[in-house]
Amino acid sequence: MKIKKRAIVKHILTPRYRDHLLSEIKKDRYQAQEEMEQLEFQLHKRMKEETDGSRRRFIKDKYEGEMSRRRERIEQASFKESRISALPEDAEIPRETVETYRNVQVGDVWAEISGEEEIIVKDGIVDSIRKRGRTEEDDDFI
C-alpha cells in the first residue's frame, strides 16, 4: 500500500543561493514599484476624466487600496532582504512543502514511516533527505 506524506524542502544558504534570493526579492520590489507608478498614472488620468464627486471618491479609494497593497509588497521585500542578508552561511531556509509517497507493508515500523521528511537542497542539487525530529505539532495528536 502507498501512503501520501509531506516533505519540507529546505535550501542551504550559500553565497550563490543568497544572491539568487536577493535577486528574486529585488525583481519583486521593482515590479511592485512599477505597478505603483502605473496605478498612480491611471488614478490621475481617471480623476481628470470623472466629474461626479461620489464616483471620484470611489475611484480614488479603489486605486489607493491597490497602491497600498503594492507599498506593503515593497515593505515586505525590504524586510525579507534584510533577513536574508543577516542569515549566516549554511543556514537552512524552508522554501516549500511537497507531497511524497511511501510504500507501507505489514511488519513495517510505524515510527519510521510516519515521521515527516526533509529534503535538503544545496545550490539546486538535492544534498540529503532526512527524517524531521518531533515537534509540538506532532504531540497535538496524542
Image (spheres, rainbow, N blue to C red):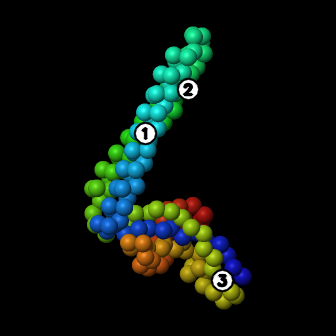
**Tag 3: residue type?**
Asn
Which residue is more in the foreground, 124 or 46?
Answer: 46
The residue at which mark 2 appears reads as: 62
* Residue at the spot 42% in from the left edge and 48% down from the top edge: 28
From the viewer's perspective, tell me whether residue 101 is left or right of residue 90: right
From the viewer's perspective, tell me whether residue 39 is left or right of residue 22: right
How packed mark 3 is, by other alpha carbons closer than 10 Å (few <14, some 14-19, many 20 or more), is few
**Residue 65 coordinates in the image, percent (x, y):** 51, 29
* Residue at the spot 51% in from the left edge and 32% down from the top edge: 66
Of the residues tagged 3 and 2, which is closer to the observer?
A: 2
Could you tell me if residue 12 is visible in this image? yes
How packed mark 1 is, by other alpha carbons closer than 10 Å (few <14, some 14-19, many 20 or more), is few
The residue at which mark 1 appears reads as: 34
Which residue is more in the foreground, 46 or 140?
Answer: 46
**Residue 142 coordinates in the image, percent (x, y):** 59, 65
Mark closer to the chain start, 3 or 2: 2
* Depicted 2 relative to depicted 134: above or below: below
Quadrant including the N terminus: bottom right
Label 1, label 2: how far apart the Cα atoms are: 18 Å
